[in-house]
């Protein structure tokens, strides 16, 4: 499913135009990204939690050349689905 598919589904379900729905979705995504840039957690109950984790520098290997490369310290966004989401997805796919 793409962003356009989400916009179409939400637009049809809410009666908002696609332009209005896209503006709302863009606003939600921008707010989440801005919060993560400030190292804040974003918790959407029943959906999941977005956060940021710091990764230590480490040695890795380029699979194409076999050459050793060094990855610097970095911060990566993370997502942990809620137990409600996990249960719904599991129940739907295990039928």
Image (cartoon, rainbow, N blue to C red):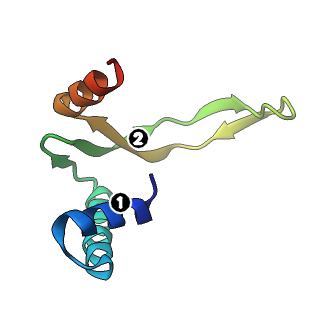
- Please state which of the two labelled residues, at mark 2 or mark 1, is closer to the viewer: 1
> Where 70 falls versus 50 (above or below)?
above
Q: Which numbered tag is attached to residue 86?
A: none
- Going 44% across and 47% down the picture, which residue do you hit? 75
Question: Is the C-beta separation of discs 2 and 1 under 8 Å?
Answer: no
- Going 29% across and 30% down the picture, which residue do you hit? 89
- Going 30% across and 56% down the picture, which residue do you hit? 36
Q: Is residue 48 left or right of residue 4?
A: left
Name which quarter of the figure residue 92 lies in: top left
- Identify the secondary structure beneath mark 1: helix
Horizontal and vertical percent for residue 70? Answer: 68, 38
Horizontal and vertical percent for residue 61? Answer: 74, 30
> Front-most of 2 and 51?
2
Which residue is tagged 1? 6
Disc with the residue nearer the chain's start (2 vs 1): 1
Q: Residues within 10 Å of mark 2 (few under 14, many from 20)?
A: few
Horizontal and vertical percent for residue 86? Answer: 26, 28
- Going 25% across and 60% down the picture, which residue do you hit? 35
> Front-most of 10 and 33?
10
> Front-most of 64 and 86?
86
Residue 31 shows up from this direction: no
- Which residue is farthest left? 45
Question: Total label count?
Answer: 2
> Where 13 falls versus 45 (above or below)?
below
- Identify the secondary structure beneath mark 2: strand
> Where 94 falls versus 51 (above or below)?
above
Q: Residues within 10 Å of mark 1 (few under 14, many from 20)?
A: some
Q: Is residue 16 left or right of residue 74?
A: left
Which residue is tagged 2? 54
């Amino acid at each position: 499913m793409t962003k356009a598919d989400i916009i179409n589904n939400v637009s049809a379900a809410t009666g908002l135009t696609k332009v209005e729905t896209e503006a709302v979705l863009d606003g939600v995504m921008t707010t989440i990204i801005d919060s993560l840039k400030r190292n804040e957690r974003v918790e959407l109950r029943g959906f999941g939690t977005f956060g940021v984790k710091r990764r230590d520098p480490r040695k890795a290997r380029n699979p194409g050349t076999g050459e050793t490369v060094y990855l610097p310290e970095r911060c990566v966004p993370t997502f942990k689905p809620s137990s409600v989401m996990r249960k719904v997805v599991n129940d739907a796919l295990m039928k």
